[in-house]
Image (cartoon, rainbow, N blue to C red):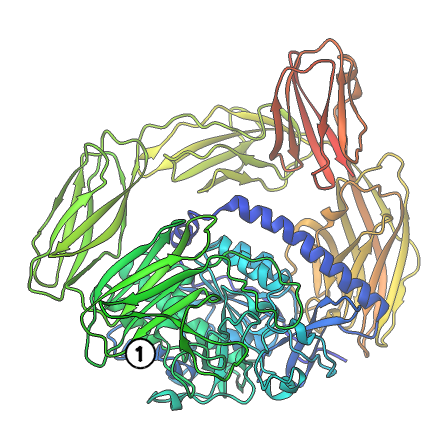
Amino acid sequence: MKKIILSLLLISTSVFSQTKSERLEIVKDYDFAKQKQFKTELVEFYSDKENRIKNYLLLNPQSKRTFSKESVLYTIDDINENGLPIYLSTSNRGAAITTRANKLYSGGGLGLNIQGQNMIAGVWEIGSMNTLHGHFQNRGIQKDLSTAAHSDHATHVTGTIIQKGSSSLLRGMAFDGGAWANDITNEFTEMVDQSFEGLLISNHSYGIPFLNAQGALQVDVEDAGKYDAVARVVDIVHNLAPYYLAVYAAGNERASSASINAAGGYDMMSFRTVSKNAMVVGAVNGVTTYAGPSSVVMSSFSNWGPTDDGRIKPDLVGKGVAVTSTTGGAAGSTQTSSFDGTSMSAPNVTGTLLLLQQYYKQLNGRFLRAASLKGLALHSADEAGTTVGPDYRFGWGLCNAEAGANIITNDGLSSSIQELTLNPGETKTFTVTAQGGTVPLMASISWTDPEALANTAGLNDRTPSLVNDLDIRVSNTSTTILPWKLDPANPNNAAVKADNLVDPFEKVQVDAASGTYTITVTHKGTLAAPQNFTLILSGINSPFAVRTALPNNTKCISETAQYSLQYFANSTTATNFVVTGLPAGVTSAFSVNNLTANSSFNLNLSNFNALAPGVYPFTVTGTNGSVSKQVQLSLTIYSPTFTSVTGFLPTNNQVEVSVYANLSWTPDVNAQSYQVDVATDNAFTNIIQTGTITTPSFLTNLLNINTDYFWRVKQINLCGSASYTSAGKFKTVNLECGVQTYSGSPIAIADVANTLVTSTMAFNNPNITSIYDLDVSLNLTHTYVQDMTISLVSPSGTTVILQEEACGSQNDINVVYDDSGNNIVCGSVSPAISGRVKSFQVLSALNGQNPNGNWQLIVDDPYNGDGGFINSWSLNICKIVPLSASDFDKNKFKIYPNPTNNSVSVLFEDLQITGYVVYDIQGREILSKNKQFSASFDIDLSSFNSGIYLLKIVTDKGDFTQKVIKN
């Protein structure tokens, strides 16, 4: 029995995407230290899940980890406390017209040409997409290099965002854009990584349904709507990357599972869809022409909220019925199919929001924060449902790109988008004039709320998961209007205007507004830190607007800078401009001032010679009567005079450096890039590796063992380049390796389902007692490679998956699995997988273990009809050969115990020790102390992960480095 969809995975070499500089601008203020810490926590999170899943599958060999039933893909996401699997499933059940995305296209009626050009959407899916589908035109890549089977579902979802077929009926929402596709393995880690590469939005058309494929209950009723650990992780990701928005499908169980919780179809959100900061999308029928709320017809299947604490979910709706998009696994395929489901409505909205990001960037020179984009979509959504305001079925209504684009176009005139910060205890007020007539005044605030503690209470606990409760009020001389609010205890009730205690989005609507109003934004309780938020206004009347598409200017100190500004008049009264906040000595001049009509004008800056390299923000303010508006600009200055680079790692003359050396240094504010050279001689006549990079670190390719290398760096900027630094020297580790080969007869892999074959081999080398590096060679014949999951088990019992159902129907494997190998590329002829390739899980997980004892190679083939043989396999295991003991004995120098579980003691005589540094195996400094020590001291390693570390002792007789193994 085979997977329903099997195809050849190839990686496109041509990718249409946001420019690197745009993505660097997005992440420039991200906290990479927090990212690293959270990723460390995710390693344990995924490791624990993976162990639970593997143990379940070993005990239940008849169960499949991933399978398809009735065109729905299922995969085990976790094992519950009762030892039963929890399955994720895909949410299957003229989209651009429904969300009015087509209005932004060339010829769409708004005078725009916004079609996704140079934009990227992320896609996470069960399975991989067909990157070579003809409608993608090389604009999609499998970003995580997944070897999972092609999925019609993944290809369809991606196509809903970016496909470009032969007619307008075969176009995705952002049909000139690109996609980064991923399977759901390590979903959250990849979301963090890619958001820190500048990814702005991603689609997730899967969830955990109440019932699994066998019809058994897998979500406890009390867990529906609960803010749990998974929802919390989603919120952490959004707080780490404030420009990143994940869009989740609401799920399709209302028809099949609504009776389970006796809530009339309500209270059907769970896990990821309960997060506060992600966008959750429900599904409706297509809307050709919107003529009022009755135009939006709810599908028969789309899940309804609320969350337990009463938050509005879904957030909004899009087309999810009869959506035609790409399917098929063949290269160059033009196959399409029509699917139903919130799996289809989610990418309908994802692609639409990508267009709004593109348009905002085109006009303003920067992207919107995720909370701003989400707030804009909710603020501008069309009314849907039988009652006024939001509800728990349609959320805030039908996504409307045209209305959102008009708010962007008229920002500063009849609308406003302001990204602001509310400090603890602060109240912000804004005075606006209503547009009047039939146009309502609408004011909303949106923010990315900090993650809350997971709720472990019982059924429908109403305790808010909101951490920072911001409030918006709109008032005039006679009344104060409150935001919309829903009642989770009575989900059918219409929304009322009251104090909202639960939603990180609040909207006030004033019908028949006239005259002047005051917008007030404040908060309840205590803010632990300043909270960013976005204020969006529509239905206002303002005398002028000013904006620039290029708010930043980068210059050398000898140059001048010019900023192009646009003025939009809504009044015949003159507007005057001034510039404030410029550094001392810089001169400024406007090309024109006292503007009364729509026009372009320039701000010119000069005299930068006294400025140090750096970034200088400043403000242009326009004033028209009592109304003032600001444009935030910045000047980045570089100098042709460079200071010396410092902070080199590895340090000069460091030994036992990894053969993949991580060369790093202190960043220089005067450098836009760095040139790095690695050579075998200090005159650099034999440069073996070189590169120009924008970050202050360089990871070498494979170096020789026990070899001296020299490296140097120079800074480069638009003014010129520095001289190279003096050469640094390091010596790579010295390795001793041993090879053990299985020498028995070939072992048969039967062609019956659920075959589990184990080959055992003893490794016996008393000279190697700790693994530094391990490679696995495997020669295996099999008539259907994708059927197999192949694992290696060490004598200590650690399992590493070498490959998991990779490739398709091709034959045979002849490989070396190596952490430094290439990603698996599936060949079209035998062997399907060959060469030196990365394993599915890293082999470095075995580092530090004693290799002596019995190793097991396990082949798991759970499908009928195909079989083969394990012909041969071998292990190549290496250890570090440290500096000779005599180097230390002559100075009466000892480090013990080594290996250690917690700490090591350093004992010495006749030495003056002034400090120590601990490096990881890549040469990165992770612990140091500068201090004069007496005859002995201890170094606490208890918080370190297991593995190999390098300890450098600084003494009056030179620096000594020795390997330390942490168990």
Task: Note whether 333 is above or below 500 in the view shown.
Answer: below
**Residue corresponding to mark 1:** 103
- Residue visible at 66% across and 51% down? 821
Residue 896 left/right relative to 225: right
Residue found farthest to the top:
910
Residue 829 left/right relative to 718: right
Q: Which amino acid does the dot numbered 1 rest on?
A: Lys
| Count of numbered labels shown in the rendering | 1
Task: Note whether 407 is above or below 2 in the view shown.
Answer: above
In the picture, the quarter occupied by the C terminus is top right
In the picture, the quarter occupied by the N terminus is bottom right
**Residue 387 figure quarter:** bottom left
Image coordinates for residue 699, horizontal then vertical, percent: 56, 41
**Residue 168 figure quarter:** bottom left
Q: In this view of the protein, which residue sits in the foreground, 629 or 757?
A: 629
Q: In this view of the protein, which residue sits in the foreground, 753 or 684?
A: 753
Residue 670 left/right relative to 449: left
Image coordinates for residue 507, horizontal then vertical, percent: 37, 70
Q: In this view of the protein, which residue sits in the foreground, 701 or 82?
A: 82
Residue 225 left/right relative to 880: left
Q: In this view of the protein, which residue sits in the foreground, 238 or 462?
A: 462
Task: Note whether 505 is above or below 296 in the view shown.
Answer: above
**Residue 611 figure quarter:** top left
